[in-house]
Amino acid sequence: MLYSAPCKIFDAAGMKRKHLLRHAIFALLGCSLSLRGADDLILADFEGTNYGTWKVTGEAFGRAPARGTLPGQMPVDGFNGKGLVNSFVGGDKSTGTLSSAPFTIQRRYLTFLIGGGGYSNETCMNLLVDRKIARTAVGPNTQPGGSERLQSASWDVAEFLGQEAVVEIVDQRTGGWGHINVDDLVQTDRRPAIEQQNVSREFVINQRYLHFPVKNGAAKKKIEILRNRNMERFFDIELADAEPDWWAFLDVSAWRGQKLTVKVNRLRDNSLALSSITTADEIKDAATIYHEPLRPHHHFTARRGWLNDPNGLVFYRGEYHLFFQHNPYGREWGNMHWGHAVSRDLLQWEELGEALYPDKLGSMFSGSAVIDWNNTSGFGKEGEPAMVLVYTAAGNPTVQCLAYSTDRGRSYTKYAGNPVVKQITGSNRDPKVIWHEPTKRWVMTLYVGFDENKDGRKTTRHTIHFLTSPNLKDWKVTSQTEGFFECPDFFELAVDGDAQNKKWVLTGASSEYMVGTFDGEKFTPETKKLPGHRGKGFYAAQTFSDIPANDGRRIQIGWLQAPSPGMPFNQCMSLPLELNLISTPDGPRLTWKPIPLSPQSAFSYFPKGLSLQPGETNSFGEHTRGFLAVTAEFEPGADSEVSFNLNGVPITYDAQKQEINVNGHRAPAPLRAGKQRITIVTDRTTFEIFASDGLTYVPVPVLWKEEARGAEISLRGAPLKSANFSAVELR
Ligand code: FRU
């Protein structure tokens, strides 16, 4: 049978809808990305509930088109509509073929979407003319990892016009990437876009920023910024071919008046990406930054892009410096830079731009910062000690490096002698450096993970290595401790504020910790590993270096894995937290409390607080913007349950269980001398709860309900023996 008209599997309405939509979008944009001509012939779109006239052999293709991702498969996207050919039925091990009925070639080109394995003859699609393979195409993947995204491709079939042909989709491979995905086969006379390699455009720089269009989820492109053929910057980016979701910016002010070349590794010839890159002195959409619907309010976020670990927390000349793991060009992890912000009060932050860019040694992974007051490194200038950043360059292997600033952290020079710590063994990262006054040396705690063979089985050991140095440049390993993973921090605290009774605390990325002693070379724990925070997604915290002695606080910031879906930025930092060690019957334990926040007004004082009766609900805060700090101090009866509903998020303290429940997440919160003291700080993407005099810290990523803005407190069970509630709106 010849068919140029759609066969059974063609859902005419569905296909039309999706093409019309695309038509409309691109017409609007004035470009012609995969525009369907009125006279295009749709061979198959795999939207139906069976394969129609297509013939199946083997198991790999199942009996009908797949509806997206199959069990055990990485997420499949890039196909059109709901259905596609996906030969992952039964996993990679299954094989088979799927062949069209014969059809006549009536247009110059056959276009299609293809994904999956990249093996000729094994995971491929063939065009058979005269029973011979006239054209063939494969998916993009042959390596572990990769992507299940379908990409558009085409064949020029002009030489076969009028002839009969068959499309045959083949899966004869059983190992890794042993499957093929196909969608939307279309005959067309419009020349399909051609992918070009290494396309570039030149700019003479006379403004501060280059702006790159980003389409969340688009295929990643590699960008290189070249100056006189030298690569100055490089990164991956989900480049928008047409209308972007947002614009990423790159500061190019260092090259004012000079020529820069922006090179993209591959780009379709109809992409608008390169031509839409612009230069400007301002950040695009600057007026909307910090006003986005899911922008946290009193938690630090990057203006643009992804953030994770806080890095290099250091205080110098009235400014707190917060560096952070940053992807300036995407909402997801990647391209690790050190972003940088400063604050005079730990509440209001000003983002300064990138402090460290990836280089030949790798991308910029986590680390710390110190002020080299005694100029041990020689990086300082007369009257200006160096601020030294100690970071991981995540090449192969990962190594530890230095960069320094003598202009209050406004610009950085990477040390020419990098790396200062070469690979010890396995994977090394996240150096946290402190000055150890008794030995007058620097001490570094460093995560070192390595594989070991134990009884013939491979296991990974996670250790923290202790290193010392007289000058930040020459380091010597002095000891190691087991049991912590990534991002160590190491600091001394006075127990109950008693300067005569100080203890050392070692923490890992999950904020578990041990308390013990330190002789300048070796940490001797006096406790087992203790739980840190009791919430979700608080990670890689570190504390500030160089807080002046007359302040003396130990202030910690952690990464809160709190997403801001759909925004041009993602994730936030915790509130700055003051850490203390207090003695408990079980020994010294850490407490967390937020640094003093800045109240707008004490809008409500719960006049009925003391008399809150079982069954009673008190409402407050309807007229606020929702940014609250609520404090509750009470002595519960045996089975009292104090519940809050803050902007639609439920929080309950259950006195019987001595447990706090935040939106379904439970955490132990023991009474202290019969009393409970709770502080709850709310923000758009995250709540932080402090209970049991700070022994329980419960950060929880949660999106509050805008329509439920307001607050309620209620009581069930036994009456409270005493109570004191207050709430403030945060500035
Ligand atoms: C922890 C971590 C670190 C690493 C950094 C990379 O979240 O994996 O170990 O340095 O993130 O972004």
Image: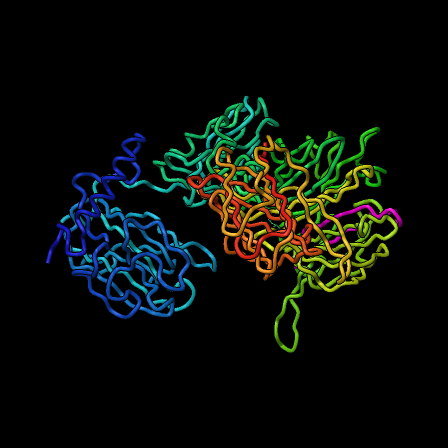
Q: Quadrant of residue 405?
A: top right
Which quarter of the rendering shows the C terminus? top right
Is residue 707 shown in magenta? no
Colour style of the rendered protein structure: rainbow
| Residue 639 vs residue 319, the one in the foreground | 639
Q: Quadrant of residue 178?
A: bottom left
435 inside magenta stretch:
yes
* Residue 232 shows in the view: no
Find residue 595 and report its horizontal and vertical position in percent.
68, 40
First to last magenta residue range: 427-445
Q: Front-most of 393 and 525?
A: 525
Q: Residue furthest left?
A: 1
In front of the other: 549 or 42 = 549
| As drawn, 501 above or below 463 | above
The x, y position of residue 625, in whole percent, is: 50, 34
Image-based side of 251 in relation to 158, left or right: right
Residue 618 at least partly seen: yes
**Residue 482 image offset from top left, x and y in percent:** 72, 64
- The structure residue drawn at horizontal position 62% and vertical position 46%, both measured from the top left corner, is 632
**Relative side of 324 to 717, left or right:** right
Q: Dividing the image into 4 quarters, which one contains the N terminus? A: bottom left
From this view, report whether residue 443 is shown above or below residue 250: below
Q: Nearer the viewer, residue 71 or 357?
A: 71
